[in-house]
Amino acid sequence: MFKKIEEKKLVGYRVICDGDEYAQEIPKAVQTLTNRVDDIKNIIYPVKQLGVFKSGETSEKDDGYWVAFEVSEYTDVPVDMVTLTVEKQQYAVYDYSGPARNIFIEYEKIHKSIEQSGYIRVRNKWTLEIYSTWGDPDQINVQLCDPIKGKINKKAEVN
């Protein structure tokens, strides 16, 4: 499914580490955020936690993985948390249920589907993972939202 997702204001934690360390550090940040949910003001959906990252080359300020809740506005943000505003963007959106360790396999399928549909992935925009369950790494439910832009012009490719 392809759809436009409106701007999102997020409050949570930013995880920055080396490649393989993310598998250990992200769950720690998720647990900490879950324990601190009552400290965040203006949460829109307290049952939906977001993971946010850019899949392409990024600047130092965009590097990492954010674990957050969406808020209607930034008010009294806890001092140990960060904010991130994700601009409105067109996405390929897919639902996934299963073990967290298989999410990379699901992304490979999504990328093939995007290509087959004629859309172009936009790797320098924010990828969204919208979790409705996240406590058990063996069973997560998540919407994977990969940023895209308009279809490739097939006629232009031929000329």
Image (cartoon, rainbow, N blue to C red):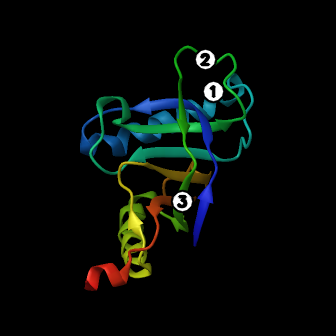
The amino acid pointed to by label 1 is Arg
Q: Which residue is mark 2?
A: 78
The amino acid pointed to by label 3 is Gln
Q: Which residue is mark 3?
A: 90
Image vertical order of residue 6 relative to residue 3, above or below: above
Q: Is residue 153 left or right of residue 77?
A: left
- Tell me where residue 35 sits by quadrant: top right
Report the mark closest to the observer, 2 or 1. 2
Q: Is residue 100 left or right of residue 57?
A: right
Q: Residues within 10 Å of mark 2 (few under 14, many from 20)?
A: some
Q: Is residue 69 left or right of residue 137?
A: right
Image vertical order of residue 2 relative to residue 4, above or below: below
Please report whichever mark, 2 or 3, sits nearer to the chain's N-terminal start. Answer: 2
Residue at 75 percent across and 30 percent down: it is: 42
Q: Are the two marked residues, 2 and 1, in contact with CB atoms closer than 8 angstroms?
A: yes
- Tell me where residue 94 sits by quadrant: bottom right
| Number of numbered discs visible in the structure rendering | 3
